[in-house]
């Protein structure tokens, strides 16, 4: 197991019902971004809704920016962000991310899958 994979497991340890809103948003944001093929993007409005960022104490767009910054600081994930407002779109800069294999390995794990399923069941759409 690589050091980077351990970091993902450490950050997202325990059952998601014990996580704070920020941790849930970080997990779901990374999950959504990891599923993208290189060159594909997700629009801000879709990311906010699919990750439950519109349900927390801060507005969705502010929460999205905070989560992006936290993921950059915590895991070094470089993002490409272009556009404005709801038309702003996000993608991972795969060419400049040395830990992409660890990220993909973590989200391919049964544990990450179980966390994702639980969170999708409890987010009210």
Image: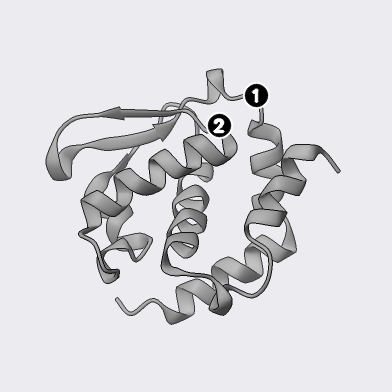
Q: Give me the residue at 47% from left, 28% from top.
A: 78
Residue placed at 40% from the left, 39% from the top? Answer: 69
- 87 or 98, which is in the foreground? 98
| Mark drawn on residue 98 | 1
Specify few, some or many for label 1: CA neighbours under 10 Å numbering under 14, 14-19, or 20 or more: few
Residue at the spot of label 2: 76
Give the residue at x 53% y 43%.
34
Horizontal arrangement in the rendering, residue 100 relative to residue 88 (left or right): right
Disc 1, SS = loop
Q: Quadrant of residue 125?
A: bottom left
Instruction: Answer few, some or many: residues within 10 Å of disc 2's Cα (few below 14, many 20 plus, some between 14 and 19).
Output: some
Residue 82 image point, x, y percent: 25, 27
In the rendered image of this protein, does residue 13 appear above or below residue 4? below
Task: Identify the secondary structure beneath mark 2.
Answer: loop
Residue that lies at the very extreme toward the top in this rendered image: 95
Q: Is residue 121 left or right of residue 86?
A: right
The answer to whether the residues at label 1 and label 2 have Cβ atoms under 8 Å apart is yes
Residue 40, x across and y down, in percent? 40, 33
């Amino acid at each position: 197991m690589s050091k980077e994979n351990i970091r993902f497991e450490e950050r997202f340890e325990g059952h998601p019902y014990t996580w704070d809103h920020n941790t849930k948003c970080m997990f779901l944001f990374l999950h959504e971004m990891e599923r993208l093929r290189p060159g594909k993007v997700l629009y801000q409005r879709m990311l906010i809704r699919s990750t439950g960022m519109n349900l927390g104490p801060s507005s969705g767009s502010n929460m999205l920016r905070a989560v992006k910054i936290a993921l950059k600081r915590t895991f070094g994930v470089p993002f490409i962000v272009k556009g404005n407002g709801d038309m702003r779109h996000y993608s991972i800069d795969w060419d400049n991310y040395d830990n992409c294999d660890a990220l993909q390995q973590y989200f391919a794990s049964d544990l990450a899958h179980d966390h994702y399923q639980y969170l999708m069941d409890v987010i009210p759409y």
